Every structure is written in structure tokens, then in C-alpha cells.
Image: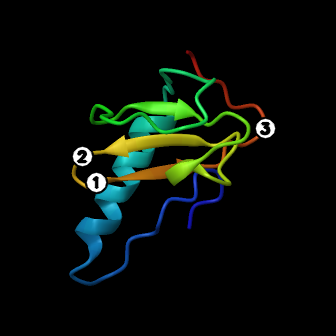
Amino acid sequence: MTVKLGLTDLANGQANYLNANTSFALLDQVVQPVVLDKDLATPPGSPANGAAYIVAASATGAWAGKEGQIAYWLTSVGAWTFVVPLTGWEARV
């Protein structure tokens, strides 16, 4: 794993495309982070592909226990993915 972003290192094998796609999705979210909201504690019902949010306090549902993290939705995965921001990261709401 890479130190700053936690990207999965590629190794020889057939699963490399999965690791690469996961890493590309993460990079897409954190290189120039834009979040739609920072005050939601409940995930929206119909998020757009790539939509990102900073999870608010007292989170519920799929976001429970993820307070302060960046949650982003990928239609191809059909689930929320979470990123723990490091000190110094900035995001625009």
C-alpha cells in the first residue's frame, strides 16, 4: 500500500485491473476533492455516480461509525466507499 493514500500496489496476476480501478476511483476523489455536503448524517437515497460527502456526527445507516470520513458513491460498485482524511487535506463544499 502507498503511504499517503493507501493505494493498493499492483502485483503480477489477473486481479490487477481491480486494484487499478479501485486506485483510480480513490485518486478521482482525493486529488481535487469536492464534496456535496458536510452536514448529512444519513446517506442520500439516490446518489449520483462519484458523489462525495463528509459524513456528519451521529451518522446512521450505511454511514454509521464513519463520522468525519469522506463517503463517495460509485455506481459500478453499488456501495459507499470511505476515505479517512489525513491532517492537512482540504475539500471544497
**Which residue is label 3 attached to?**
87
Between the C-alphas of marks 1 and 2, the distance is 5 Å
| Residue positioned 26% across, 84% down in the render | 13
**Which residue is label 1 attached to?**
78
Mark 1 residue type: Gly
Residue 24, how many percent across, how many down?
Answer: 35, 48
Judged left or right of residue 43, residue 91 is right
Label pair 1/2, CB-CB below 8 angstroms: yes
Q: Describe the element under mark 2 as helix, strand or loop.
A: loop
- Quadrant including the N terminus: bottom right
Judged left or right of residue 29, residue 83 is right
Whichever of callouts 3 and 2 sits on the residue coming sooner in the sequence is 2
Q: Is residue 62 above or below residue 70?
A: below
**Which residue is label 2 attached to?**
75
Most extreme residue toward the top, as rendered? 93
Whichever of callouts 1 and 3 sits on the residue coming sooner in the sequence is 1
Disc 3 packing (10 Å; few <14; some 14–19; many ≥20): few
Mark 2 residue type: Thr
Residue 57, how many percent across, how many down?
Answer: 73, 37
Mark 3 residue type: Thr
Q: Describe the element under mark 3 as helix, strand or loop.
A: loop
Label pair 1/3, CB-CB below 8 angstroms: no
